[in-house]
Amino acid sequence: MSLRRILVADDEESMRWVLSKALKRKGFSVDLAHDGRQALALIQDNSYDLAILDIKMPGINGLDLLDKVCELKKELLVVIMTAEASMKNAVEAMKRGAYDYITKPFDLDVIDAIIEKVTRARDIAGQVTMLKHELKERYQVEKNIIGNSAAMREVYKTIGKVAASDVTVLVQGESGTGKELVARAVHFNSGRLGKPFIAINCAAIPKELLESELFGSEKGAFTGAVERKLGKFEQANHGTLFLDEIGDMPLDLQAKILRVLQEREVTRTGGNQSIAVDVRIVAATNQELLEKVRAREFREDLYYRLNVVPINLVALRDRRDDIPLLVHYFLNRICSEMDVQTKQCTEEAMALLGAYSWPGNVRELENAIKRAVILSSDALLTPADFSGLEPVSTERATASPDASLEVIVDAKLRSCLNGVEQLEKGEIHSMVLEQVERPLIRLILEKTRWNQVKAADILGINRNTLRKKIHELGIELKRD
């Protein structure tokens, strides 16, 4: 929040010249105005950190200009100058919202003191604003991570264990699973709350620009570098830096990231000075980094530096129990944001959403809900409002190496019952159990070379119970 740009408005050319020279020597960018109207135009068209205004100026005097500044740019701090050291002027200036008041003539030391005071005030104001913003985001993040499945409960436990420390965290999961939400939850539950959380997507920035984005650049370091630029590491100092899609980072930059993790210092592009940084790293990827390590596309030493504590986010298709919770959450939030009547899904629509494969994960589900809310004029959303979503097939579920038995069975049952308008009273429970038990018992018997004692022990049932089930299920016994 340091000062960068200052406006000086005074009808005396000598005063403008003295202040401009003194401020520029300290590295500030300074604009000058010779009267109140010119100063007002500059304030309207530009962004200043501080305005130093004379009270007596042609066109608009300093106090009236101060009133307009309070209307137009409430965040702009104003220092009033006057040659008349009267209590009336001082009281009036402060009453109208001036930050400070100085009397001509003055030593430049007075200006130095004011600059230091203003800088401290802006730093404090910036920290308060950041704290409010981060507290608000923390509240939103903790509400946005939805799920009661076993996989999500493990994620919550890991966040709770690592948040208070400064260990590096690697969040892994498919696109749309909520990796940045987890990174923010780690930050907001840590001792770095109130400090910056800076995110950068390593895949979204061209290779030639990524280095200066991360480490900053000095003026003249390359074409277009007209001023010093702070990189993400410096911006995140004392806070957390989230390196999203770290797997797409070029190898030469990986070496520099490794050095930062080891040395805790950066060097801006075009510079030769090492700058100490205190940053917690949370990285994320949707790729198998170990495979990239084996292919020599990712540094092994960096991988182990990043993978101190891994947090793995499972795909939405592998935590289907969370889909109704997510649907209700998105419906309530989206309807509230759009200021429309809260909508609900019919049972048929919810069944469709639960059966879909969600290749885009939670992000795709959110977009599907948003689209349905926008396009439907009814309070109840039906399958027709989610056109284009096809239930996952048994073949697709089986083909997925990460698919659980529950997902495969769920997909098969939905496939069998698809199109059935009304379920009638019958023996569906015993029928399903029979079709699951028969292949299970047959497989264990095969594995034990048809030894019923061993098979019963593995299955965790009594031998007599096993013999009864073999008979009831019509399993043909074989002998090796």
Image (spheres, rainbow, N blue to C red):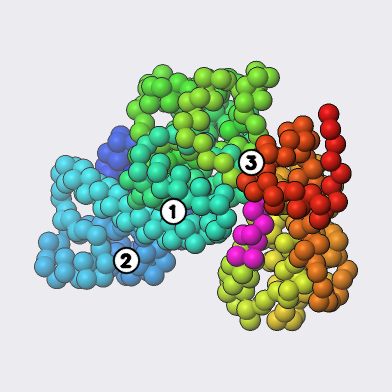
Chief secondary structure of the magenta span?
helix
As rendered, which of 366 and 424 lies closer to the eye? 424
Q: Residue at x 39, y 58 (%)?
A: 135
- Identify the image quadrant of residue 174: top right
Q: Disc 3 versus disc 1: distance between alpha carbons?
A: 77 Å
Residues tagged 3 and 2 counted as in contact (Cβ below 8 A): no
The furthest residue to the front: 464
Q: Nearer the viewer, mark 2 or mark 1?
A: 1
Residue 399 got which mark?
none
Disc nearest the viewer among 3 and 1: 3
Q: Considering the numbered disc 2 on the image, is that residue within a helix, a strand or a loop?
A: helix
Residue visible at 64% across and 66% down? Answer: 324
Image coordinates of residue 469 in percent, x first then y, are: 76, 52
Mark number, residue 47: 1
Q: Which residue is mark 3?
A: 457
* Amino acid type indicated by mark 2: Leu
Q: CA distance from mark 3 to mark 2?
A: 87 Å
The three-letter amino acid code for the residue at tag 1 is: Ser
Q: Are marks 3 and 1 in contact (CB under 8 Å)?
A: no
Image mark for residue 66: 2
Q: Is residue 202 visible?
A: yes
Disc 1 element: loop
Q: Across the whole image, how many numbered discs are drawn on residues?
A: 3
The residue nearer to you, when weighing 389 against 378, is 389
Is 395 covered by the magenta stretch?
no
Q: Amino acid at mark 3?
A: Asp
Residue 161: name its quadrant: top left
Compared with residue 231, is residue 377 higher up or lower down, i.e. above or below?
below
Q: Nearer the viewer, residue 430 or 296?
A: 430
Q: Is residue 394 left or right of residue 453?
A: right
